[in-house]
Image (tube, grey):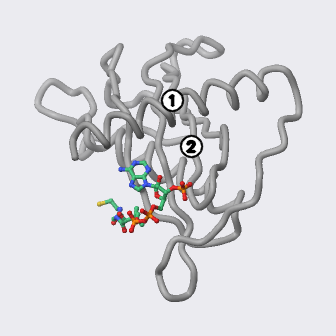
Amino acid sequence: MTEVVLPGDANALGTIFGGKLMQWVDIAASVAAMRHCGRPVVTASIDALHFLEPVRVGEVVVIQAQVNESFRTSMEVGVRVEVEDPRQPGQRRYTTKAYLTFVALDEEGRPTPVPPVTPENEEDLRRQHEARARRQARQAMRRGHG
Ligand SMILES: CC(C)(COP(=O)(O)OP(=O)(O)OC[C@H]1O[C@@H](n2cnc3c(N)ncnc32)[C@H](O)[C@@H]1OP(=O)(O)O)[C@@H](O)C(=O)NCCC(=O)NCCS
């Protein structure tokens, strides 16, 4: 997904609101999840988001999302955000990375099983393994919070 940062997306410093970027990340990731399972999905959780670089009005935000792994009814989507200054074509700054979990819903709005992920290369395989480890960490944290 590609977006241009408009003045309405920015704060008084002329840099993007974190919440706006989170919205775009959520939308791009949910589309990847819906394409994978062919169902409506809801965001169950978003892991830590770190904003590594300011993003300015007029810059182009490029958001890439991929389903890393599917579990029973949930999927982990990895998102990478890069930014282009149109005056410096071909150069991209890495701005944000995030992992989101989506749950597929049936007609009654209940969680419903999703298809498996089939890795197509070494990178996909690495992401799948890392997603499994993150799920374990997530579940341990949720149990801890009771
Ligand atoms: C996400 C939601 C559907 C889960 O419902 P639930 O009754 O807890 O369902 P279950 O306990 O059967 O869990 C379903 C799946 O969600 C996962 N899940 C639930 N809460 C989660 C969380 N906080 N983080 C990650 N995964 C979560 C479970 O691990 C399970 O995955 P699995 O089937 O792959 O093992 C429910 O909590 C919900 O509707 N939340 C609101 C979602 C929403 O409105 N999002 C918009 C943002 S405000």
Q: Identify the secondary structure beneath mark 1.
A: helix
Please, which residue is most extreme toward the left here?
Answer: 12
Q: Quadrant of ligand 1?
A: bottom left
Cα–Cα gap, marks 1 and 2: 9 Å
Q: Are marks 1 and 2 in contact (CB under 8 Å)?
A: yes
Q: Position of residue 113 (x, y in %)?
A: 65, 67
Q: Amino acid at mark 1?
A: Arg
Q: Secondary structure at mark 2?
A: strand
Q: Position of residue 75 (x, y in %)?
A: 59, 50
Q: Residue at x 71, y 57 (%)?
A: 36
* Left or right: 80 in relation to 12: right
Quarter occupied by residue 10: top left
Identify the residue position indicated by label 1 in the image. 134
Bin the neighbour count of mark 1 within 10 Å (Cα to Cα): few under 14, some 14-19, many 20 and up.
some
Vertical placement of residue 79 versus 53, above or below: below
Pick whichever of labels 1 and 2 is earlier in the sequence.
2
For this orientation, the residue located farthest to the bottom is 108
Residue drawn at point x = 43 percent, y = 23 percent: 96
Q: Is residue 39 left or right of residue 111?
A: right
Quarter of image, res 141: top left
123 vs 89, nearest the viewer: 123
Residue tagged 2:
76
Q: The disc labelled 2 sits on which kind of residue? A: Glu
Q: Nearer the viewer, residue 137 or 32?
A: 137
Residue 64 percent coordinates (x, y): 61, 36
